[in-house]
Image (cartoon, coloured by chain):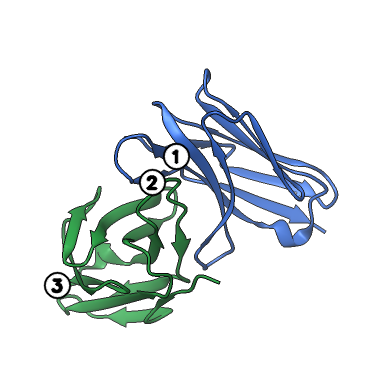
Amino acid sequence: DVKVTQSSRYLVKRTGEKVFLECVQDMDHENMFWYRQDPGLGLRLIYFSYDVKMKEKGDIPEGYSVSREKKERFSLILESASTNQTSMYLCASSYSRLPYEQYFGPGTRLTVT
Amino acid sequence: SQQGEEDPQALSIQEGENATMNCSYKTSINNLQWYRQNSGRGLVHLILIRSNEREKHSGRLRVTLDTSKKSSSLLITASRAADTASYFCATVYHTGNQFYFGTGTSLTVIP
């Protein structure tokens, strides 16, 4: 079974802190994704990566950066957390060929106070 | 936005009834996928239908695709309380490999 794990299920941080969210997959997938999910807005893509050290901005990259030093690991970084980044963060991975079925981690609920 | 739109936003039915939710999208797709999300958890892939297919079945799930209307529907037959979850469609386009998720349908099955 494909497994995507995220470093924390719940996280509480203070405004201005640097926050690291980590995601690891064990299926040798080329693609990895970070989404945030907010009520009424569905899933919005923050960044995705199609290879090690490669990244592409999604729909809402502002305030975030990412790092992919190893194929299995994709990190989301909030350089200076703000209260409007309180959200559910979901990591996903997929092969880099159609049909691009995605496998999700359990999510990290981040609260910024 | 290329995000799909789902309808209805929320659905409440009795156990044993069928549940139908719909997804509309905007441009030509390669495939459309349905995912399920239990409260506070990640999404789980349910079923995929390719643009050259009109209907697919998987257990109690039936998906249809009408490319002329740019719409898809997910039918869950003989619903159970355990089907209570949010359901999302995701459209995959011919260009690039990004997904576009809809905003989801929240299904409540009352025992």
Q: Nearer the viewer, residue B36 or A94?
A: A94
Figure check: B97 above or below A103: above
Q: Which residue is mark 1?
A: B91
**Image location (x, y in percent) of residue B35:** 55, 52
Q: Is residue B90 left or right of residue A67?
A: right
Q: Tell me how far mark 2 sits from mark 3, CA to CA.
A: 28 Å
Q: CA distance from mark 3 to mark 1?
A: 33 Å
Q: Would you name the residue on which mark 3 appears?
A: A80
Residue B68 lies, in percent from the top left, at 52, 18
Q: Nearer the viewer, mark 2 or mark 3?
A: 2
**Quarter of the image where one finds residue B2:** top left
Q: Amino acid at mark 3?
A: Ser
Question: Residue A50 appears in which quarter of the rendering?
Answer: bottom left
Tell me the CA gap for discs 1 and 2: 6 Å
Badge 3 vs badge 1, beta-carbon distance below 8 Å: no
The residue depicted at 17 percent of the width and 79 percent of the height is A17
Q: List the residue tagged with mark 2.
A: B99
The N terminus of chain A - image quarter? bottom right
Number of numbered discs on residues: 3
Helix, strand, or loop for circle 2?
strand
Q: Residues within 10 Å of mark 3 (few under 14, many from 20)?
A: some
Pointer 2 and pointer 3: residues touching (CB < 8 Å)? no
